Image (cartoon, rainbow, N blue to C red):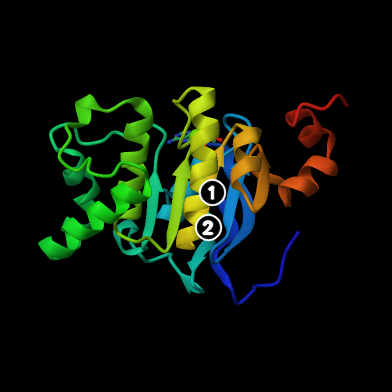
Amino acid sequence: MTSPLSKRALLRVEDATVRFGPRAALDAVTLEVAAHETVCVLGPSGSGKSTLLRAVAGLQPLDGGRVLLDGADQGAVPAHRRGVGLMFQDHQLFPQRDVGGNVAFGPRMHKVPRERREARVRELLDLVGLPGAAGRAVGTLSGGEQQRVALARALAPEPRLLMLDEPLGQLDRSLRERLVVELRELFGRLGTTVLAVTHDQGEAFALADRVVVMRDGRIAQTGTPLDVWQRPASAFVARFLGFEN
Ligand code: ADP
Ligand code: MG
């Protein structure tokens, strides 16, 4: 299905194709994310979710199609100039830096002056619910706390698009459910534009304004969580959501 290029689309992915050998990890994927929208890509392992995010970030070259941010083709734009933040599942904080040093990493790379950097770190740590943690050693943090620091680090350079790849994948269910609610509230408050990936439908439905279901490198369905839940577009989507066919 093609949708008209809406003026408000912050991200537009157009017929994006990525092949690994004979297999297409992405097969002519087209999708849009509007400014301030949270879109969750949902799908089984191997369906191409991470490849999609990496392609948008500029870490994975396309074999076909294109990526536009604010209407501008990113084909010739290197990853560090795209203004997108990407947070991986294994968020890998820098163990030799304290919490503040981790969060300040992006702004330091972008030569933000020290005073503004420190104010930004304080502000972000407040936002993610870790006030006053700047001086703590990474090794003393719990898994959930590390996840929050990784999120603050991804937000620090003020990306125009924040992309999360299984951001809560390594946490236990109760913590995940709590963090998802907090994230949704946080993104709403900041007006962040988010493209997140998960294989957990509960997480996707709780976080997303819109859900994109992927299968074998293609989009199987796009809609609001309620749409997809009430009207799965195919037997695959229904099965993936846990309905009997
Ligand atoms: P997901 O994130 O949905 O689990 P991926 O995007 O990681 O899926 O992978 C999609 C498909 O592409 C899988 O079949 C995977 O094995 C393959 N793939 C991903 N990255 C590479 C790579 N660097 N080299 C070869 N095949 C890859
Ligand atoms: Mg993945």
Q: Residue at x 47, y 52 (%)?
A: 186
Pointers 1 and 2 in contact (C-beta within 8 Å): yes
Q: Residue at x 88, y 26 (%)?
A: 245
| 2 sits left or right of 139 in the view | right
Q: Which mark is residue 24?
A: none
Residue marked by disc 1: 184
Q: Badge 1, how many Cα within 10 Å: few under 14, some, many 20+? A: some
Nearest the viewer among 81 and 109 is: 109
Judged from the image, the secondary structure of the residue bearing numbered disc 1 is helix
Q: CA distance from mark 1 to mark 2?
A: 6 Å
Location of residue 80 in the rendering, given as x and y in whole percent from the top left corner: 30, 58
Nearest the viewer among 41 and 142 is: 142
| 138 sits left or right of 83 in the view | left
Q: Quadrant of residue 91?
A: top left
Nearest the viewer among 228 and 148 is: 148
Location of residue 178 in the rendering, given as x and y in whole percent from the top left corner: 52, 34
Q: Amino acid at mark 2?
A: Gly
Determine whether the beta carbon of the residue marked 1 sits less than 8 angstroms from the nearest atom of ligand 2: no
Residue marked by disc 2: 188
- Give the answer, above or below, for where 7 lies relative to 174: below
Q: Quadrant of the N terminus?
A: bottom right
Location of residue 184 in the rendering, given as x and y in whole percent from the top left corner: 54, 49
Q: Residue at x 37, y 45 (%)?
A: 128
Judged from the image, the secondary structure of the residue bearing numbered disc 2 is helix
Nearest the viewer among 30 and 193 is: 193
